[in-house]
Image: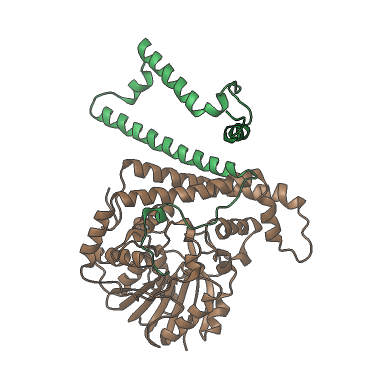
Chain colours: A brown, B green
Amino acid sequence: MSQAHAMMPETLHDERARLAFIIDLKGCLDVKASVANAQLLERNVMPKLAPRDGDDPLHAARKAMEKELPYQNWMTLMRSAQQMMWDAVGRCVDRQYSDLESRAGEYSGDEQVRFDENFEVPRYLTAVDTHLMPGSYYTQRSSNDVRQGAVFDLAAAIYHRGQNGNELNDVRGHTIVSHLWERFPELEAHKLLELGCTVGHSTAAVAGYFPDAELHAIDIGLPVLRYAQARARSLGIKNVHFAQENAETLSYPDASFDVVYSSVMLHETSAKALPRIMSECYRVLKPGGVVIHLEVPIRYESMSLAEKLRAEYETHYNNEPFWRGACTADLVGALRAAGFEGVEEGYQQAVPKASRGAEGFSSKRGPVYACWYVVSGRKP
Amino acid sequence: MSTATDTQGRFRVARAEKPKIHDDPAIDDLMAMVASLAGEVAVLRERVDTHERLAAAKDCFSPDEVDRFTPSAEAQATRARLRTQLVESVFRPLLAPENLEDPGSHAAIVEEIERSAGGM
């Protein structure tokens, strides 16, 4: 089976069949069951609800729904499908792990991901394993371990059902550049920083637009960073430097970068971390520099009760503890408080390739994958 | 601890509170098992599909021949035995006859055996 890049784990016949089943199950649960859930909510649950003044109607609706057997069945299958995905992907990676580690070593050579022995992975990432991925982004067995990177890469390749750029999973990266060129067309990007790069899906895309620029990509997880480095080198990308850092306390000097950006990273932080991250974005940007945060196009203020209920599932049952927090946070306010000007939020049309002059940023929300929520601003 | 040297156990189970979704938590596990089992059935079915396509490509036999296959009397008998075994093992808890061998309270038996005077 031909691969988009040389680090991607291979899949054998039965592994592909298993993963295809799991993804189809997830698709079935998401599409059909969401319709049924909305009907159950509207017809059976809402008419019986009598929330008292001051009660959060969403909380009351969720608690009532969670007592309904069809909704309980849906939740159990959702959780099972997610666990099955990580289990199947994990076993596939483990089968071929020594080959993967050797290959990563070949592509990276002597190059090490920069790390600090005293680094502490923040609690919002160690408290629970994000999206039920056993071992999360940071667990490693040795100083060469890339397992969690391989697991994440393979899972992401199937999870999005091809809607984020198939195995390269890079539509979000192209969309970030599309946003940059639309809102800040005159900005010259010589030095860029990506926060929370994981395995470099967006990083590789962004790097391609600025071959003469210097990119830095940070994450809290060493095994995903090592994999990201090997993956990027296997794609011929040489201008990205990977390092283990916490976006709340960056090691870079003031006024280092022209662009600081993140791609679906904020929702994996916390309410306390958000303002610190925004401050750090401001600090490390040069005057005139630009910050861009891309997130899931799931904003509570623009969603129906049924849609919010679906988002609540992520928060409470899919180990995304800051999903709701991020989807309700005043990100515009957070950037302004950090000192940014010209802060705007909206939805950027997803593109497989950015082009100058395109108009894809508006307040009109589209479906996930067709667009992404973006908030951006400029340092005066 | 920022990093953890680890055994494979850390990679099999996610750090998460196990939710209690159904009123009876046994149902949660049961549904999870059914979902996995359905997955394995899907895998097997796909492998059979591959076998049939490869066999057809090499002119061994076609899927149509599989559809029209008539088992011999011996084959039917073997299959009947296999089906009975499968049903009995899968549905064992439901099919077991009324417990004719029920000796009553196990706790009482343990107590009796442990009693030093007047015990068994």
Classify residue B50 by image quadrant: top left
Looking at the image, which is closer to me, A32 or A62? Answer: A62
Is residue A239 rendered to the left or right of residue A39? left
Residue B100 position, x and y percent, is 60, 20
**Residue A206, visible in the rendered structure:** yes
Image quadrant for the N terminus of chain B?
Answer: bottom left
Is residue A74 rendered to the left or right of residue B77? right
Name the outermost residue toward the front. B117
Name the outermost residue toward the top. B73
Looking at the image, which is closer to me, A238 or A111? Answer: A111
Residue sitting at x 26%, y 59%? A101
Image quadrant for the C terminus of chain B?
Answer: top right
Classify residue A57 by image quadrant: bottom right
Q: Look at the picture and state if B43 lies above or below B10.
A: above
Residue B13 position, x and y percent, is 45, 53
Residue B67 position, x and y percent, is 38, 21
**Residue A162, visible in the rendered structure:** no
Residue A125 position, x and y percent, is 47, 67
